[in-house]
Image (cartoon, rainbow, N blue to C red):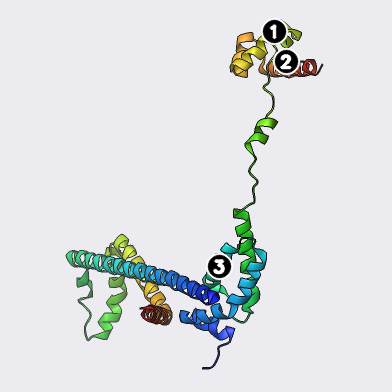
Amino acid sequence: MRKRRLEDKIIGKVYRMETQRTFTFITTRIILFLVSASFILLFLSALIDILAEQGSFDLFDFIGPDFEVVTRYLPDNLILFWAETPKFILFILTLAIIGFIYLMAKIIKNYRMLKNKFVSIYKFYNKKT
Amino acid sequence: MRSLSDYEAIKKIKAGEIDHFSFIVKKYTPPIHRYVNSKLYNKLEVDDLVQNCFISFYKAIPNFDGSRPVLPYLYEIAKNELKMYYRSHKLTLPLKEEIVAAEAPPEVVFDQSILNALNAKDKNILLALSEGYSYEEISEKNKIPINTLKSKVRRARIKLKLKTRI
């Protein structure tokens, strides 16, 4: 009887710890996800605004059905477009996108494990009540 | 229901099915409890230590090689937990007040006449040091190099020591 109580105590403690860990993990991931998504949105809209104000998108007006014209002007216009792009904003945007992709990959990789943990935690607390 | 092997249970726990940890707990609690109980003089702490062992094991599961046997690993954890316990609960013997009072060293009364064994200069230097002056201040005041002053102090102290022994 005493041994059984000890086992229950150990399992209860492990579940409490795991619940805390899982919820901390989920909360931090959600916060990071929201932060990186809002960064992407903010810097992407800023970049598009700046490029539109500069008229940089006009550099691609030549793109049409004529393939020869496209192959002739595209390299030069791409170089010009790159030169006109605000580098700092582009750098931050790239970082935010990399972070976002990394986060998504992590969540997808751990999805099964997280789901199993949720099921186990739910079963444990449901059985208790 | 088919009983699980340790390897399968560990694999499932790693995959997030933490309810399989109860299988490990139920299987290994009796031997670990016996082991800790045999090593611990304070029987009230046995349960806590066993709990700590299993929690440490649970934390180590992501890095645990499932093909290895679980029990020796648990014993090793229990051993470390016991070490930590004994380190934090070192046995101390409080001294009785009467014994402390009886064994207290007698108060030392400094006999000023011992200083008469020194010459006036050395006597002044030692008195200045005892009053809290630094070596730099004394060397400046007496206009002697600091190393000479240190030698003088050392020689004077040896002289005094010899005098007090006699």
- Mark 3 belongs to chain: B
Question: Residues under labels 3 and 2: Cα distance?
Answer: 66 Å
Same chain under badges 3 and 2? The reply is yes
Residue B7 position within the rendered picture, expressed as x and y whole percent measured from the top left = 58, 84
Classify mark 2: residues with Cα within 10 Å, few (<14), some (14-19) or many (20+). Answer: some
* x 37%, y 75%: residue: A104
Residues tagged 2 and 1 counted as in contact (Cβ below 8 A):
yes
* Residue nearer the viewer, B65 or B1: B1
In the rendered structure, the answer to whether residue B4 lies left or right of residue A24 reads right
Amino acid bearing label 1: Lys
Q: Residue furthest front?
A: B98
In the rendered structure, the answer to whether residue A9 lies left or right of residue B115 reads left
Q: Which mark is residue B121?
A: 1
Q: Which residue is mark 2?
A: B152
Task: Say which element carries label 1.
Answer: helix
Question: Can residue B40 be seen from the camera position used here?
Answer: yes
Residues tagged 3 and 1 counted as in contact (Cβ below 8 A):
no
Residue B37 position within the rendered picture, expressed as x and y whole percent measured from the top left = 63, 68
Q: Residue furthest bottom?
A: B1
Amino acid bearing label 3: Asp
Among numbered discs 2 and 1, the one appearing first in the sequence: 1
Q: Which mark is residue B47?
A: 3
Among numbered discs 3 and 2, the one appearing first in the sequence: 3
Residue B6 position within the rendered picture, expressed as x and y whole percent measured from the top left = 58, 83
* Residue nearer the viewer, A91 or A25: A25
Classify mark 1: residues with Cα within 10 Å, few (<14), some (14-19) or many (20+). Answer: few
Task: Say which element carries label 2.
Answer: helix
- Mark 2 belongs to chain: B
The image shows residue A78, relative to residue B7, as above or below, that is above
Among numbered discs 3 and 1, the one appearing first in the sequence: 3
- Report which quarter residue B79 is drawn in: bottom right
